[in-house]
Amino acid sequence: MLDEHIVFVDLETTGATATHDRITEIGVIEVNHGQLISEWSTLVNPGMSIPPMIQALTGITNAMVASAPSFAEIQRALLPRLKGKLFVAHNARFDYGFLKNEFRRCGVTFNARVLCSVKLSRKLYPQHARHNLDTLLERHELACEARHRALGDARVLWLLAQKWTAERGAAAVKAAVDVLVKTQTVPVGLPDLAFDNIPETPGVYLFYGDNDVVLYVGKSINIRSRVMSHFSGDHRVNKDMRIAREIKRIDWKQTAGELGALLLESKLVKQLAPVHNRQLRRNSQLCAWYWADTGGADGNIGHAPQIATADDIDPARFGELYGLFRSRATAIEALREIAATHGLCNILLGLEKRTAPLTGACFAHQIKRCRGACVGLESHEQHALRLKQALSSMRTVPWPFEGRIAIRENTIDGECTDLHVLDHWCYLGTVRSEAELHDLAEVRTAPVFDVDTYKILKRYITKPPHGASIVRIAA
Ligand SMILES: [Zn+2]
């Protein structure tokens, strides 16, 4: 165990529930090959009050954390301290769960190989029933100068690790650690070393079950750590528990970068329809609102937006289509919401028939939600103008190029390149060189529009990340 790169971690918190309570103090002791590398500790402002009982136990008061940084402020400094090391804590599930949740709140995925020192103690000293920290201090005749403070308790773990290694021998400790760390991560259906060959690069991974049924397809900028996080054993979602029971084989496809992983994942999920991926509706139900801005004096005044169905959703018409919806019902719901927010008239929008015989007012106007285009309180021109503004946020984006392009994406070390070939928001494929690019350009199959691909590309092309380059391909 001590031949590894380890962090001994202890946390103080406002309570016992990782999803509700927050961290008030973190202590980290880093040890590499048995050498103490660093000790690090900070108070953390939990953003909530610490219960009096806990203040009394730890000595950490509301006043002490009031001026401390929040977890969000220290997470950048903390993450590199923990990353890639064996995470050791007493009741590790508790500390690891708290940190995972705090990182998640900051939008960061934190995963580690975890070792619980309670379990290790139990394995090395099975003759003893109690393995809490106070009992262990007494049993091994160790002293702690700051019990119930994060760094003080983390130091105890480091002392225990040395004591155990001295008493039981490095080989016995290592064997016990190996069993504990492994049983917790590799699902039963997989060989022990199933994770060892998975690369730490961007790409897509596939989980297979009995009879090579595809269970799940996912993507990551670090395939290995993402795969392992499915089986980390803490805060598992139901889906991951089912996958852990059914999985028999893992496969993966490396990509140069994140875009390639996103495009490939989207393609494979549709192609393979894995058992545990959220099943997306097929494009056949796709629809959008069509509302042409003719620009003339009368424009499209008086014309209600029309629903364009899958056959009409041609990327060449993007700009005149608004929103892309997976069903007619969601399209109508979205337009109703826009009408309600902006005081537009459901009668003029074609969402309601004129039923009030005397006034001709729409229902929304009767409850003062529609500004009254239906009863002449607002001109149709003015209503059309406001509709145009209201729709603008969901306007589809016209393809900003002449024709086919490729997006060049390099691996971090610059050694490999992917060229993703695209035409009018459709993904045609990925090649590895300019020569292949022209082979693919020869292929004249009609591109198939896919809404998920469109969303991925729209985000990417309207805000290209640093280092992305676009190659124009002659038609
Ligand atoms: Zn109205």
Image (cartoon, rainbow, N blue to C red):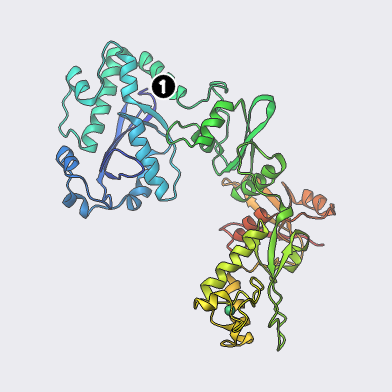
| Residue 358 in the image: above or below residue 430 | below
Residue position for label 1 = 180
Q: Which one is in front, 450 or 1? A: 450
| Residue 468 in the image: above or below residue 416 | below
Mark 1: secondary structure: helix
* x and y percentages locating residue 243 in the rendered image: 56, 31
Q: Residue at x 70, y 39 (%)?
A: 272
Amino acid bearing label 1: Leu
Ligand 1 image-quadrant field: bottom right
Label 1 CB-ligand 1 distance < 8 A: no
* x and y percentages locating residue 424 in the rendered image: 74, 61
Quadrant of the image containing the N terminus: top left
* x and y percentages locating residue 168 in the rendered image: 31, 13
Quadrant of the image containing the C terminus: bottom right
Q: Which one is in front, 197 or 71? A: 71
Which image quadrant for residue 138?
top left
Q: Is any atom of residue 421 visible in this view? A: no
Which image quadrant for residue 122?
top left
Q: Which one is in front, 252 or 247? A: 247
View extreme (top): residue: 127
Q: Is any atom of residue 119 visible in this view? A: yes
Q: Residues within 10 Å of mark 1 (few under 14, many from 20)?
A: some
Drawn side of residue 68 relative to residue 84, left or right: left
* x and y percentages locating residue 235 in the rendered image: 43, 36
Q: Residue at x 23, y 50 (%)?
A: 49
Q: Residue at x 43, y 41 (%)?
A: 110
